[in-house]
Image (cartoon, rainbow, N blue to C red):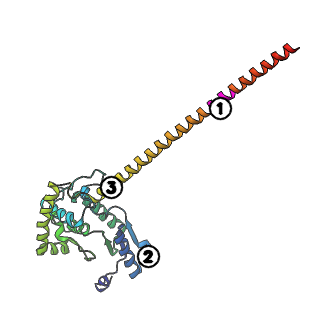
Amino acid sequence: CHLLKEAGIAPSIVRYSLAASSIDTANIVGAEFNIGRDRLVPEFNYMDPRAIGGWDFSPKNITEEAVWAMDTDEAGPSGTGGRPPPNEDGTPSETLSDQVVRLTNLLSVLETLYSGDEILLVFPDGTGPALLSCLIGGIPLYRVHELNFQSGEIRQNVDYSSVNTIATSLPPPYYSEIIERGRRELKQLRENPDEERNVKDLKFEEERAVAEAQRKERQELKEREERQNELERRQKLEDERRMKEEQRQERQIQAQKREAERKIADKVK
């Protein structure tokens, strides 16, 4: 906010991602600049970060640099190459061009609704705004990570000229180091896909194993209870049968006694 004020920028619209950090940032900016809640506008889809399929939720320090290297070497000018591996749980695996579709829709919405407004876009990551910058400046998309935003970084008056000014300067030395490390990490991920397994998948498998063990335990307990209940039911039926048989025999004995007594009485008469 201090940087915005020092630059004389007073946004009239804040469009923000639904990521927790973006929501917090939007609320802080709204409070500092007295922006009404109706001018703090959540974006439900178009500002989402790129989905990386089987690498989603994997350790960021491994996958991020691998993705940067993949985009640099394989994405191509239009970003159609370099697709992360798919995931069995249905998590999308997107190329840069897939993300471009969302960002062009975002630009269309902004132009339609907010012509003449000072718009502040709050992204959840650094690649989304960098990719949007490439679209504005006509920069080949495989160079997107040269324009990557740092956490909390603000760029103002983003237009064709300002983007190309950044793009014409050589990337810092650390960028080349990141790409080289990323190439090694990308090779490792592709050669040994099971070694760096998706954290989400591992957690899911662990939970599934626990749930399966609990299900089996419940099933065994249920079967034991059913067997016990069946034994008790049969025992009860057997006890009832034996009691009825004893009662029948007792009645038969009593009947025989009465018959014998009747015969004796008849003889006496």
Q: Which mark is residue 83?
A: none
Instruction: Classify mark 2: residues with Cα within 10 Å, few (<14), some (14-19) or many (20+).
Output: few
Q: Residue at x 50, y 43 (%)?
A: 225
2 or 3: tag closer to the N-terminus: 2
The quadrant the N terminus occupies is: bottom left
Tell me the quarter of the picture where residue 162 sits.
bottom left
Residue reaching furthest to the right: 269
Classify residue 124 as left or right of residue 235: left
Classify residue 115 as left or right of residue 171: right
Range of residues picked out in magenta: 241-248
Circle 1 or circle 2, nearest the eye:
1
Q: Residue at x 14, y 69 (%)?
A: 178
Magenta stretch, main secondary structure class = helix
Q: Relative to 171, say whether 236 is above or below.
A: above
Circle 2 or circle 3, nearest the eye:
3
Instruction: Classify mark 1: residues with Cα within 10 Å, few (<14), some (14-19) or many (20+).
Output: few
Marks 1 and 3, how far apart in space? 55 Å
Q: Relative to 62, say whether 91 is above or below.
A: above
User: Is residue 267 part of the magenta span, yes or no?
Assistant: no
Instruction: Classify mark 3: residues with Cα within 10 Å, few (<14), some (14-19) or many (20+).
Output: few
The quadrant the C terminus occupies is: top right
1 or 2: tag closer to the N-terminus: 2
Marks 2 and 3, how far apart in space? 46 Å
Q: Which mark is residue 206?
A: 3
Marks 1 and 2, how far apart in space? 85 Å
Tell me the quarter of the picture where residue 118 sits.
bottom left
Q: Whole-percent x and y of residue 32?
A: 39, 82
Q: Give the labeled residue for mark 1.
A: 243
